Amino acid sequence: MNNIRLQLQKIYWMVSENPFGSLESLLALAIPLVIVVLMFNWRVKQSMKKQKRIQNRRDKLLKKLNGGKQKGGEEQVESDDEVVKEAIKRYRGLLFSLTGRSGRI
């Protein structure tokens, strides 16, 4: 244990006196940085896997929820289009009443 401590102190003093003077000092700087980068990449991958699992579960639940409602799919799309058109009309009317200009966007 004492030998390792002495080696670490030696490397520390070499780095502090002349940071880029020896191979050991470069390795002493590079190895921790590489480890941090690898840990960060691993954490990002784990997070992406978790997000993918959550999205897959959400998609499955939506399929189950919409399973009985898919019979009238075409009618639903048409009625959604009508709702969107009506919302745009009302929004333009609101813009006209607030600004006094036409509601063209």
Image: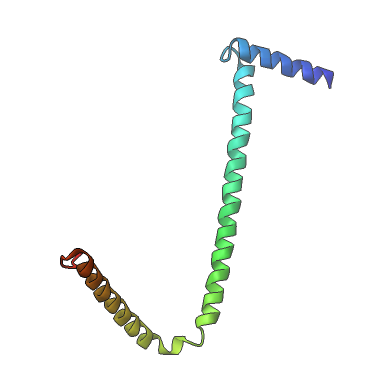
Residue furthest toward the left?
A: 101
**Residue found 62% across the figure and 13% down from its top:** 16
Considering the image in quadrants, where does the C terminus appear?
bottom left
Q: Is residue 88 left or right of residue 39?
A: left
The foreground one among 5 and 80 is 80
Relative to the observer, which residue lies in front, 15 or 90? 90
How is colour applied across the structure in the image?
rainbow
Looking at this rendering, what residue extends furthest in the right direction?
1
Residue at (60, 13) in percent of width and height? 22
Image: 3 above or below 72: above
Outermost residue, top side: 17
User: Which of the 4 image quarters holds residue 19?
Assistant: top right
Residue located at (52% from left, 72% from top): 59
Callout count: 0
Where's residue 92, x and y in %?
23, 70
Rendered location of residue 17, percent (x, y): 61, 10
On the rendered image, what quadrant is the N terminus found in? top right
Q: Residue 96 vs residue 34: left or right?
A: left
70 versus 9 height, above or below = below
Q: Position of residue 51 (x, y in %)?
A: 56, 59
Q: Is residue 75 above or below residue 100?
A: below
Residue 35 x, y percent position in the rendering = 63, 35
Q: Nearer the viewer, residue 87 or 31?
A: 87
Look at 73% across and 19% down and name the residue there.
8
Spot the residue most to the bottom. Answer: 71
The quadrant where residue 71 appears: bottom left
